[in-house]
Amino acid sequence: MHTLWKGSISFGLVNVPIKMHAATESQEFHFNYLHKTCHNRVHYLKTCPHCDIEVKPEEIVKGYEYEKDQYVILDEQDLAEIERPMSQSIDILNFIDLKEIDPIYFQKSYYLSPEETAQKAYRLLSQAMIETGKVAIARFTMRSKQYLACLRAYEEGLVLETMYYPDEIRQFDVNLAKVISTDTEIALARQLIESLAVPFEPDRYRDELREQVKEMIERKIAGETYKVTAAPEPGKVVDLMEALRSSLAATEHEKGKLEPSPAEAAESVDSEGKEPSTLTPRKRKTKRAKGA
């Protein structure tokens, strides 16, 4: 894996040299902008409207606008001077329970791997966090930005989640004080939730839109046409109770297609006590009909 950052994990007097690697990657399609007439790529030039010239990368500096059209210039040396004292360490501040952190704070995941000389200390930290059920709140600096982070045990090692600071979380402005749900509505909503509840299995979920884009691209490369199947029109929700009942009925109907009913399961056990057949209800019914 490509190393994005090198430093160490520091907690108490313990120092664990590590390397940081991206834990996730985007699978979305990236398109280039082309000139419609000749299908050549369009180039974007950085220009200065005041000087009316193209600006080269080495001529660009960073400026902060503190008033309208008034900038203070910060060069790379200025930022490096601030960053240097704190740029080589992931400093653990506290250990807490993961359930205390709302997911809204999480940004991006990174794997942390140990340097060869630090494998024992790395494993010790990971194992101690597993046994205590704690995660670490830490702070580190990368690319001129100081991050708040959550450090936690993951499989055989450690993963770091960068986090938003509290002042980066926008206020959630919604007022539902005058909205009251009836006991029946709540009971139906709970029943619907419970009917859709399953253990989390990541492989269950797919990016269907990306799969369709991929198929479209492959067909266009092959000179074929691709027609998108029209999505069914959503039904009009006239009454909340009716919508809940209809959703629950639809969910139970879908489950019935996948799972045999108790009566069907009982019928599939023969007189010798054999295990139920692995045939689907439709195939089982057909088999009985042939034997009749």
Image: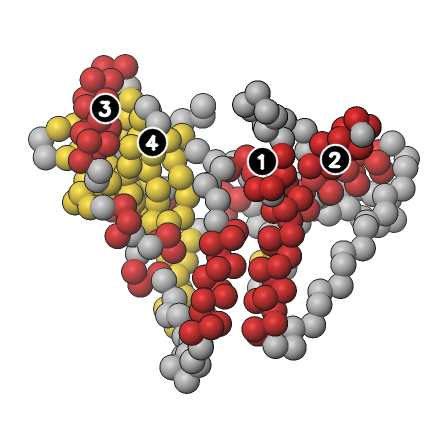
Q: Is residue 55 left or right of residue 144?
A: right
Give the amino acid at mark 1: Ala
User: Label 2, label 1: how many angstroms apart (C-alpha)?
Assistant: 13 Å
2 or 1: mark nearer the eye: 1
Q: Nearest to the eye among marks 2 and 4: give it.
A: 2
Mark 3 lies on a secondary structure that is helix
Q: Is residue 24 left or right of residue 229?
A: left
Res 77 seen here: no
* Residue of label 3: 122
Please, what secondary structure does the residue beneath circle 1 have?
helix
Q: Residue furthest bottom?
A: 178
What's the residue at 27%, 30% (across, down)? 7
Mark 3 or 2: in front is 2
Q: CA distance from mark 4 to mark 3?
A: 12 Å
Q: CA distance from mark 4 to mark 1?
A: 43 Å
Upstream in sequence: badge 3 or badge 1: 3
Q: Earlier in the sequence, mark 2 or mark 4?
A: 4
Instruction: Please state the horizontal and vertical placement of residue 148, each as a whole percent of the image.
Output: 28, 48
Q: What label does residue 285 carry, if any?
A: 2
Mark 3 → mark 2, Cα distance in angstroms: 58 Å
* Between discs 3 and 2, the one toward the N terminus: 3
Label 3 sits on what residue type?
Tyr
* Residue 33 x, y percent position in the rendering: 73, 47
Circle 1 packing at 10 Å, graded few (<14), some (14-19), many (20+), is: few
Of circles 3 and 1, which is in front? Answer: 1
* Cβ atoms at labels 2 and 1 below 8 Å apart: no
Q: Which mark is residue 154?
A: 4
Sequence-earlier tag: 4 or 1 = 4
User: Do we see residue 240 in this rendering?
Assistant: yes
The CA distance from mark 3 to mark 1 is: 54 Å
* Kind of residue at disc 2: Lys
